[in-house]
Image (cartoon, rainbow, N blue to C red):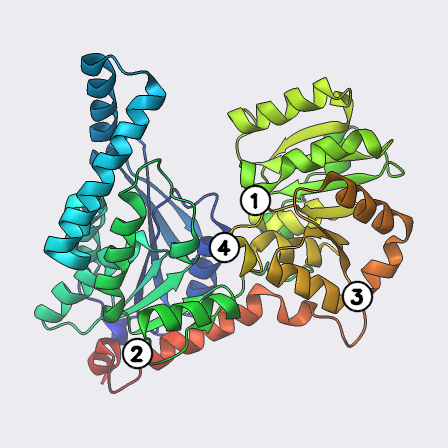
Amino acid sequence: MQFDAASRQGIRGRVVMLVDNGVEGDSRVQKAARSAADAGWDVTLLGCARIDRERDWRLGEARVRVLPLGAPAGPARNRGLRGRLVSRGGLPLRAARLARRPVEHAQVVLWRGLQGDRAWRRLEPGLWGYERLFGPVIDELRPDLIHAHDFRMLGVAARAKLRAQAAGRPTRLVWDAHEWLPGAKPRRDNARWLPAHLGYVREYVGHADAVVTVSDSLAELLQRDHHLAERPGVLLNAPVAADEPAGDGEPAPDLRRLCGVDRDTPLLVYSGAMAVQRGLDTVVEALPRLPGVHLAMVVGDPAAPYVRGLVARAERLGVPDRVHVVPYVPHRQLVAFLSGADVGLIPLHHWPNHEIALITKFFEYSHARLPIVVSDVRTMAQTVRATGQGEVFRARDVTDLVRAVRAVLAAPDRYRAAYEGPESPLPGWTWEAQAQRLDALYRRLLSPEDSTVEAQAR
């Protein structure tokens, strides 16, 4: 149904947000949708997941719809190729993988030579699955503005914009780049994955009316890589203000109670995604040299293989009773939940995207008033040294991590003082501040002379 601005007083325009996940674990996406709706935009957030049927719910005034995603084409073909190499050639798995890689590299060279950036259609055809899933729904919603989160949604949004324009409906596109794709770890063991997605982004980035991202460093890289006329705006991955009611009024769980420790027990916390490059192995290895110190890991899937591996390593090191795995809480409860710890950990390995970001947990720890112990990844290490809110250690260095943790536990008030007084960075590190920038961007793009909504209202 066509949006009628005159009949919906106070609604500024219709916004469709797109994300290639199930929404529930993505705090940035949830906050963007909810705050835009609170500011008066008619927001529908579309996500996707491997589910049997569509799910929908409300985030404040924003509507969330999670669409059922079918099996992608790419991985099935890869598994078939691997099976043929093993079964027909009698190759062991390692040799089969090596044989597959030259084939994939040859495919990249061939198709990029023939089609340039458009080669993603041959190298990563599974991307069409997102188009088939999201495209008809976007067209039905008839948005005035499409907000595409991360790289996979950029092409989906750009094609929807072009269809809308062809139908005489001016539609604006905001691309929200969550990471620097050239520096990302490929999400599949496949030599086609990265060049295909890089070409996909290059083909469609020119259709974005504005680009926003998560840090100044990434904004500079995006402007350089894509020759953008305007430097991308920065929306930090900051939490909602710490004094807001947590979780829509529900009290946050007690982290120490979940871990079974008292107030006097030193408690380190790590919150977020779990993978080898996140550095939790270093933390577990350090525990035998930190007597009495406990570790809480707040994770999305406590039964994940990597998490189980960390617990097994703690058992081998003789510290199983000091490692606690606890599940995620709603993002509006997280700051209060984390505040029960003594130290927030960010033990990342060196990886291009780790060097340029102030990640979500950095701001969550800060609003929980936790001293932060961070590895020497560039941007976060520089920030911690400038503010005095924690200690920096050499990535993957157990001895240096032990030093940093001991320093913070010996004088926690020294580090917590960085969050107090007129020099505190916290007022600028809130989602409310970012939401104001997002609202201003939407209003600029849908100005009276450009916006379908405003034209209808007149």
Nearer to us of marks 4 and 3 is 4
Q: Is residue 360 above or below residue 23?
A: below
Q: Which residue is mark 4?
A: 352
Residue type marked 3: Ala
- Front residue of 175/219: it is 219
Check disc 3 and report its element: helix, strand or loop.
Answer: helix
Is residue 100 left or right of 327 when viewed as pictured? left
Mark closest to the chain's N terminus, 4 or 3? 4
Q: Is residue 283 visible?
A: yes
Q: Residues within 10 Å of mark 2 (few under 14, many from 20)?
A: many
Mark closest to the chain's N terminus, 3 or 1? 1
Mark closest to the chain's N terminus, 2 or 4? 4
Residue 203 coordinates in the image, percent (x, y): 21, 62
**How far separated are the C-alphas under marks 2 and 4?**
35 Å
**Quadrant assignment for the N terminus:** bottom left
Name the residue rendered at 14%, 49% in the picture: 111
Name the residue rendered at 56%, 68% in the picture: 432
Residue 356 coordinates in the image, percent (x, y): 53, 61
Please tell me the numbered disc located at residue 446: 2
Please tell me the numbered disc located at residue 418: 3
Q: Residues within 10 Å of mark 1 (few under 14, many from 20)?
A: some
Mark closest to the chain's N terminus, 3 or 2? 3
Mark closest to the chain's N terminus, 2 or 1? 1
Q: Is residue 336 above or below residue 4?
A: above
Mark closest to the chain's N terminus, 4 or 1? 1
Please tell me the numbered disc located at residue 330: 1
Residue type marked 4: Pro
**How far separated are the C-alphas under marks 4 and 3?**
28 Å
Q: Residues within 10 Å of mark 4 (few under 14, many from 20)?
A: some
**How far separated are the C-alphas under marks 2 and 1?**
32 Å
